Image: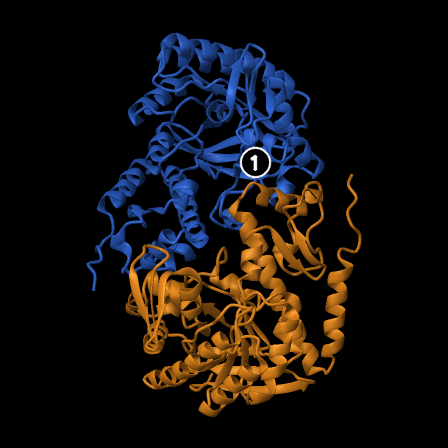
Chain colours: A blue, B orange
Amino acid sequence: MTDTFSFQINATDGAARTGAISTPRGEIRTPAFMPVGTAATVKAMYPEQVRATGADILLGNTYHLMLRPSAERIAALGGLHKFMQWDRPILTDSGGFQVMSLSSLRKITEEGVTFRSHVDGSQHAMSPERSIEIQGLLGADIQMQLDECVGLPCEDAEAERAMRLSLRWAERSKKAFELQPKGRALFGIVQGGAVPRLRVESARALADMDFPGYSIGGLAVGEPQAVMMEMIETVEPHLPQSKPRYLMGVGTPDDLLEAVGRGIDMFDCVMPTRSGRHGQAFTRFGKINLKNARHQNDPRPLDEESDCPALRDYSRAYLHHLIRCEEMLGSMLLTWVNLHYYQDLMRGARAAIAEGRYADYKAATKEGWARGDILPWTGE
Amino acid sequence: MTDTFSFQINATDGAARTGAISTPRGEIRTPAFMPVGTAATVKAMYPEQVRATGADILLGNTYHLMLRPSAERIAALGGLHKFMQWDRPILTDSGGFQVMSLSSLRKITEEGVTFRSHVDGSQHAMSPERSIEIQGLLGADIQMQLDECVGLPCEDAEAERAMRLSLRWAERSKKAFELQPKGRALFGIVQGGAVPRLRVESARALADMDFPGYSIGGLAVGEPQAVMMEMIETVEPHLPQSKPRYLMGVGTPDDLLEAVGRGIDMFDCVMPTRSGRHGQAFTRFGKINLKNARHQNDPRPLDEESDCPALRDYSRAYLHHLIRCEEMLGSMLLTWVNLHYYQDLMRGARAAIAEGRYADYKAATKEGWARGDILPWTGE
């Protein structure tokens, strides 16, 4: 354990890196996938189960938590870690992204943003300072500056305006963050839409401010994967090599493999949890949609060689039945399957980078997805 | 292990009895509470968790399973135990009760009942023989005769007609059951509404047929608890002492304590699972409604002395938050709490009967509920 925040790279393989972020609440092995615990719970999972899949860190959503049960209430109860029974690191977003995507009657000014809650219509204000205050009340180990994220495609001028505003908010966030206890970290967020010169300007300006880590925001907002990868390649050379890079809100297993290969260290996404609740399993054989009627008589588990009970012990026919009947156990098992797979993918990536065989790992993993099940079950 | 079905009474205390039912799939300690696994899952629980609360046996609902995924499909997949990953005993109902309460366009004749599925409107027929066939396909260890259950209050003539029909169906069910493998048991079901002479007639006629166990049906259908207890007291002397008695669909913790004291050995009820999903916790301090705003700042767990993580590790404020946000983890934790409590109640009853102090146990347990929390939390 340490009382400071630090990042150590243990090995590189091309642009890919593996290492560890040290925090007072524990180590985060990178590349790392962070399960999303929106409302102080990773949906359909017990916290110790999430840990057992290999997660070193969770993500909490500032927007949701400020509305329910409120940052002040969580602080009075001893902070988010204690509230949700997760004693390892937590990263919080700034709330900005979900203010934009979920709330109503939004008004953005230089000062910040006012909006109405999607839950009860109540009026709220968010500024860089208030976002950091909330994240501090929650007790987040890694916090995000408030930024403005534009959807893609987007006019260059609009992307530029939002990027510049985000830089000014980065300065204000950094100043507000100085009040917080040692050992926590604030990340700056690169914006700039799909415009390379704006992305470079944003990355350089943030690097000059010397953050302990850098997020790449404004991607996975509707653009093709090729654009996402182009933006990562554009930005990467301008971010300090010695600091962790976090690609926000990404993504599919394929996105993760590609982005790790381009030097990304951290990810979060609702995909494994949300897809699980909708009957989709991510496995080494690719995506399997358990809602599909072809599984209804299939006695095979998803992966009999797995060490995860959700993959090993329950037949596809049973999982299909649970999903069709909208039984909670279906969501519980498939969320477990998916979080297990995402962590497996990161475990494999870390080992491969350490051994200098990341390209092979990526290719072999994709081959597994493409091949699908070794022997499709043909029925009785 | 044994290859036959048998019941042994180890101790009695007044009318209360404690013992064990032996089956080829394991022992059922009595008095026993059976969690309800309607659609081949105890809602919001992993099967190994259900077992860990102390459950020796689950209940499956024939009506739900015949509609989805169908008895034939479950049989082809190796039976209900394998399907739902529960290798201990399973009791199934006949399907009759839920045909009456859930399906539409029902038509009852001497032969059986036709109805339309509440799921997709498909047409189905159920007879005593078909019910037993389905329960056999599921592989249920303890099966129920098809009966007709009337709601209360009810005209005497109607209760009499349904009771007589149920007796004729008992004969047919028994005959159909002869085809099944050894080691399984079929229970007859006492009916007769709230009319003592009908209940006595039903119990005597079933006892003459010599079933390995007897259910008391047609209670917990709207009548006051006093009527339920009067009917149990009426029926009990006419049931063979050496056979298990199962009070169907009952009930509250108080109902269980009272019925155990009147010689009942087995219970099932959706109350602990359904109430859990609706934010209600059953504890040794009585019922606690976690939806109530008075819990929103309460840092105390439900019971810090409990060995159940759901009771011990999570604050009431957190449980309140989860229920308010309709998070699955709220249902998962409170279902766990409630199943744990129901099993605790039965564990305590068994020990108390064995030691000849059941009346004291009942009184002390009710005192705990009435006293409530020792120190109501008064806020910050």
Question: Residue A225, how many percent across, how many down?
Answer: 31, 27
Image height check: is B171 above or below A23?
Answer: below
Res. A238 image quadrant:
top left
The residue that label 1 is drawn on is A90
Res. B304 image quadrant:
bottom right
Image height check: is A134 above or below A167?
Answer: below
Q: Image quadrant for the C terminus of chain B?
A: top right
**Residue A121 shows in the view:** yes
Please name the residue shown 69% across and 39% down the image.
A78
Please name the residue shown 39% across and 65% down the image.
B63
**Residue A1 shows in the view:** no
Image height check: is B272 above or below A110?
Answer: below
Label 1: which secondary element? strand
Count of marks placed on residues: 1
Compare residues A121 and A55 and report the one nearer the observer. Answer: A121
Question: Residue A261, how many percent across, how many down?
Answer: 35, 31
